[in-house]
Image: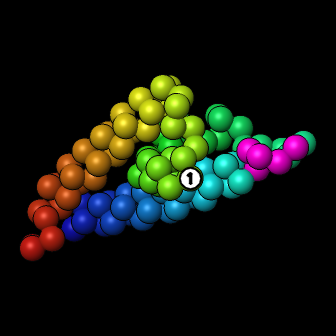
Amino acid sequence: MYDRILFFVYLGVLLLSSLAAFCLFGRDKALAGKEGAVRIREKTLLFFTVFGGAAGAFFGRRAFRHKTNKRFFSVTVVFALLLQTGTLLFLLWKAGGFCR
């Protein structure tokens, strides 16, 4: 029972973090072309990517064409996405799947 709760809590964290990461990448891209605008720090973008927002960062980078030429961002996003997906699948397996 607690395995299912943990799965859904983790899924919720991933969804909220991904939404935040997607919005942050979009906001930073919008600010990138403006003279004197205070941009979002790369540390902040990477923080949301690593701590649950890898899916949002992945799609945000594609949708806004932002930070796509930075190798460190690419490696970090892919690695975090694999790790978060693997963790989610492990929790789903521990919970007995959806057909329990």
The quadrant of the rendering that contains the C terminus is: bottom left
Choose between 56 and 68: the one closer to the eye.
68
Choose between 6 and 61: the one closer to the eye.
61
Relative image position of residue 39 (x, y in whole percent): 77, 43
| Prevailing secondary structure of the magenta residues | loop
Q: Give the range drawn in magenta.
A: 31-35
Left or right: 79 as drawn, with respect to 87:
right
Relative image position of residue 11 (x, y in whole percent): 36, 61
Residue 41 included in the magenta stretch of the image: no
Relative image position of residue 24 (x, y in whole percent): 63, 53
Choose between 100 and 76: the one closer to the eye.
76
Q: In this view, does 66 lie above or below 59?
A: above
Left or right: 40 as drawn, with respect to 10:
right
The colouring scheme, among rainbow, by chain, secondary structure or one colour, is rainbow
User: In the image as oriented, which residue stretches furthest toward the right?
Assistant: 36
The quadrant of the rendering that contains the N terminus is: bottom left
Q: Residue at x 52, y 61 (%)?
A: 19
Residue 32 included in the magenta stretch of the image: yes
Secondary structure of residue under mark 1: helix
Q: Work out whether residue 53 can be spotted.
A: no
Q: Residue at x 41, y 29 (%)?
A: 75
Q: Name the residue under label 1.
A: 64
